[in-house]
Image (cartoon, rainbow, N blue to C red):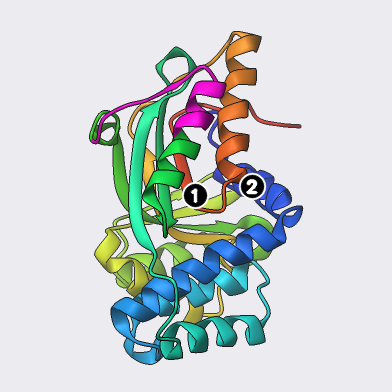
């Protein structure tokens, strides 16, 4: 599948994220708070929290910051209650966009997301208007530059742990799991000491859209940038077949 170097996308995301580490830590802190509230503060008994802690470490979040976030979520009766909300809509030329947010004020978040769509010549739609074009899956990316082992061995480790699919890209390996099997597969990789460039539950587009008009590309990037700047927004998924950046 051309144009979808997952590792290139992750590197691009990471470079952007490095410039906004504080924002990343804020978002992960919220995910920790929700995971602790749902399953308790002990990662050994809370697979969702284990996954978030692993994500925090992938993003170089310091251990003491992680510990502090868990303690705060577990012990603070006045801790902020975050609610999970999802928005769907269209970018230029009908590009499908899904926005996942954790918020303590749904009115504020909805207004900010709507504003991002309209400033980028897109529009928010109703629930379900584009989500049918995506599949919710666990996705683990192993960069070839971080893995010197045998590809077949990596595939067998993933499949034996319960992965659905394994594919080799030019610069990386991609492992796809059912969302319910994600934690198990990620932990199996961790036990084998396999470095993961990315490991998350994500929304994978079933079809891709291209933008050829410069104005549309500018508008789409405007939407993504504005959503990226919003602290309430956790993740943005879209089916834009972004051109590879040199």
Please give left or right for residue 221 compared with residue 136 in the image.
right
Q: Is residue 60 left or right of residue 239?
A: right
Pointer 1: residues within 10 angstroms few (<14), some, or many (20+)?
A: many
Inspect this view and state whether residue 147 appears.
no
Residue 116 on the magenta span: yes
- Residue 62 falls in image quadrant: bottom right
**Residue at position x 60%, y 74% in the image:** 57
Q: Nearer the viewer, mark 2 or mark 1?
A: 1
Asked whether the viewer can see residue 83, the reply is: yes
**In this rendering, is residue 137 above or below 193?**
above
Q: Secondary structure at mark 2?
A: helix
Expressed as whole percent of the image width and height from the top left, the position of residue 7 reads 60, 48
Q: Is residue 230 magenta?
A: no
**Which corner quadrant holds the C terminus?**
top right
For disc 1, the marked residue is: 233
Q: Residue furthest top?
A: 213
For the point 71% across and 31% down, the residue is 245
């Amino acid at each position: 599948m051309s144009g979808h170097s997952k590792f290139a996308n992750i590197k691009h995301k990471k470079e952007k994220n490095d410039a906004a580490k504080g924002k990343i830590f804020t978002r992960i802190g919220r995910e920790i708070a929700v995971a602790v509230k749902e399953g308790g503060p002990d990662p050994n008994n809370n697979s969702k929290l284990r996954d978030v802690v692993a994500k925090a470490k992938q993003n170089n979040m310091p251990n003491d910051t992680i510990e502090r976030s868990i303690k705060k979520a577990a012990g603070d009766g006045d801790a902020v209650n975050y609610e999970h909300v999802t928005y769907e809509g269209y970018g230029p030329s009908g590009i499908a966009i899904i926005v996942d947010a954790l918020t303590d004020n749904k009115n504020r978040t909805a207004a900010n997301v709507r504003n991002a769509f309209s400033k980028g010549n897109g529009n928010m739609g109703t629930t379900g208007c584009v989500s049918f074009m995506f599949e919710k899956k666990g996705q683990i990316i192993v960069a070839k530059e971080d893995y010197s082992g045998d590809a077949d061995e990596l595939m067998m480790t993933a499949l034996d742990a319960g992965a659905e699919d394994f594919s080799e890209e030019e610069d990386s390996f991609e492992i796809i799991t059912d969302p319910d099997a994600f934690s198990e597969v990620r932990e199996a990789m961790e036990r084998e000491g396999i470095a993961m460039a990315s490991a998350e539950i994500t929304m994978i587009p079933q079809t891709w859209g291209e933008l050829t008009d410069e104005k549309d590309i500018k508008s789409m990037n405007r939407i993504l940038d504005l959503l990226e700047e919003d602290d309430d927004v956790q993740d943005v998924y879209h089916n834009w077949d972004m051109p590879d950046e040199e």
